[in-house]
Image: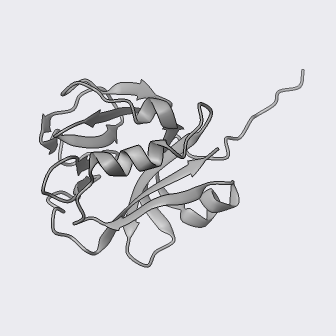
Amino acid sequence: MIIFIIMSPYPGLTRQYSITSLLTNGFYKVYDVFYDNYTLGSDFDRIKDQCSIYSILCAGCGSVDSDILDLVACANCYSVLTPTEQNKPVLVGEAYWYMTSPLSFGFSPNSTIYQNSADTFNSSDQFRLSWHFGQSAGGWRLGNLIDLNSNRNYKKYIFIRN
């Protein structure tokens, strides 16, 4: 019996993943801002315009001037960028994604989130990302790092592969 193991050219939901690895696997950067920058609907409209039905989107965050994403998740672009109801993320790939205006955008390792604006559920969970969306506030959360609204030591990234 022969067993084939298919390695995905992108992470589902992981920590400490290289930006260079994404770029080498055909992704290109479409969003690169400091954590204190507001994330608006027009940002996501521009990003979605670059997707096809087969595109993969990766959202992640990392320290300024680092090649390593502290946290990243990847899934189908159109599915990730589909609006969701408050506190009702949708499983896409290996993460539960949400995009609820005017609250937040992000992902979680499970379906339990609390969008008190951004996701404030389980502040010790290292696999949650949450950015304020459609508000006059910047980031919020990168894993167990919270209250990053005015932070310029971390960046928000989105990559796409068509």
Residue 67 versus residue 96 in the image, above or below: below
> Is residue 5 shown left or right of residue 160?
right
Q: For the point 83% across and 27% down, which residue is it?
A: 3
Residue 52 at x, y = what percent? Answer: 59, 36
Residue at the farthest top position? 1
Specify the quadrant of the image occupied by residue 1: top right
Q: For the point 50% across and 37% down, which residue is it?
A: 77
Residue 155 at x, y = what percent? Answer: 35, 66
> Is residue 69 shown left or right of residue 7?
left
Q: Nearer the viewer, residue 126 or 99?
A: 99
Answer yes or no: is residue 162 visible: yes
Residue 90 at x, y = what percent? Answer: 36, 25
Residue at the farthest right position? 1
Residue 81 at x, y = what percent? Answer: 40, 36
Name the colouring of the figure: one colour
Q: For the point 81% across and 30% down, which residue is it?
A: 4
What quarter of the picture does the C terminus occupy? Answer: top right
